Amino acid sequence: MSDIRIDTQFDSGNIEVLSTSGAKAKLAVRKDHMSEFAQWFHFRVAGAAGRELELKITGLNDSAYPGGWPDYDACVSEDRDYWGRASSSFDKDEDNGTLTIRYAPASDIVWFAYFAPYSMERHHDLIAEAAASEGVEYKHLGTTLDGQPIDCLTMGEGDFQVWLYARQHPGETQAEWWMEGALEVLTDPSDSVGRELRQRCRIHVVPNANPDGSRRGHLRTNAVGVNLNREWANPTPEKSPEVLAIRNAMDKTGVDFAIDVHGDEAIPVAFLAGYEGIPSWTEAQGERFYLYERILDRRTPDFQTEQGYTKAAAGQANLTMSTNQVAERFGATAMTLEMPYKDNPAKPEPEQGWSPERCKMLARDCLAALLEWLDAKDK
C-alpha cells in the first residue's frame, strides 16, 4: 500500500518528516524560529483510512520540556472540531526520546497536535463576535513584527481595573480556549456573573498576546525567537512590541487585578502562581492573591493548590515576568494561571483528557471566583 502523506503548511503547523513507510512515519519537532525551544507539533496525515498509524516523534530528550512526554497522549481530530486523544507512549531510550502515537482513523484525513489548536482564523472570529456585542469596545494596541494586530476588547462601567491576557507562549493554546470561555460569560447579557462583573469592573481582554508565534507554529516565542514572558521589565519595539503595547496600555488604565493565562507541559493539573518575592511585597497584597486562590479551589474540582511552582524567596522575584512586574508596578493582585497538556490522574477523562471544553469551563469558574473575591477582599 502507498505511504501516508504528512503536511504542515497551515496555520500553526509544525513537524519535520524524517521518513515514511506505509502507515508508519518517523518525525521530529521543528524548533521555534531563532530559538532553541521545541515542543509544539501540529500536522495532518492523509491516506490512512483503514490502517493503524504508527507515528514516532523522535529527539524529544532535547525538547524544551522533556518532562512533558511521560504519561502524555497526543491530541487527535478527524473534523478539526472535536479533539480527542490518541494512545501514546514515551521511551526516553529510543532515538534520543521517542513519543509513539498509535491511531486508526475512520476517515482518510486526520490531524494531530500537542493540544487542540486555536487558529488565527478562529481568533479573528472570536474578536469579531465579541466586538459586535453591546457595550464592548475594540482597541488596536499595536502591531507585531510580522504585521499582525494586537487585539484588545474592553468592557464594563466600573472603576476596578481588570486585565486578562493570554497566549504569550503561543503553543499553550489552552489559554485562548480559556479566553473564549471568558468572553462568552462577559458578553452574554443573560449571564448573571458577566453582567455583575461589567457593572463593577472595567475589563480589558487580550485573547492572544503572541499572534506571530501562533501562526508560525511556535511553542514559546515570537517572530524573532523572543520569550515574551521574560520581556516585561524592559520591552522594546525591536524584540517585543507585543509586551510593549500591552504594558503601555496598562500604564494608561492602571491594574487592580490581572490573570496571565498559560499552559504547563509537565504538571498534569491546573494551578496558580503568584508574585511572592517582589520588592514591594506586603502580607496584605499577598493575602489578596491567596484569598482568590482559596475561592477558586473551593469552586471547582478542575483546580487545585497541592501542585505548582516553587515560590520565590523574599526579594528574588523575576521582574521580567508579567505577573511579578504587574504586581510590583501597579500594586495589583496578579497571577499566572497554568493549565495542563496531560490529563489529571486524580480526575481522568480518557476520551479527551484536559480539553478545550474544560479550559472554557475553568474560565467561567475563574470569573465567578473573581465576583466572589470582590465581595470578600475588603471584609
Image: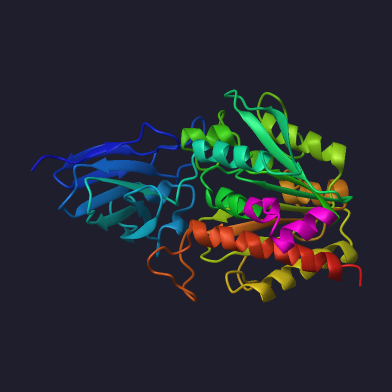
Q: Toward which corner of the image does residue 284 lie, by quadrant?
A: bottom right
Q: Image height check: is 291 above or below 214? A: below
User: For the point 44% across and 47% down, which residue is it?
Assistant: 63
| Quarter of the C terminus within the rendering | bottom right
Point out the stretch of residues depicted in magenta: 183-199
| Quarter of the N terminus within the rendering | top left
Q: Image height check: is 90 above or below 127? A: below
Q: Position of residue 273 (x, y in %)?
A: 69, 60
Let me know if residue 221 appears in the view.
Answer: no
Q: Toward which corner of the image does residue 185 lie, by quadrant?
A: bottom right
* Magenta span dominant secondary structure: helix
The residue most toward the left is: 1
Tally of numbered discs = 0
User: For the point 27% across and 38% down, which residue is it?
Assistant: 6
Q: Position of residue 123 (x, y in %)?
A: 56, 40
229 on left or right of 45: right
Q: Nearer the viewer, residue 158 or 7?
A: 158
Q: Image height check: is 6 above or below 114? A: above
Q: Nearer the viewer, residue 321 or 258?
A: 258
Q: Position of residue 298 (x, y in %)?
A: 68, 76
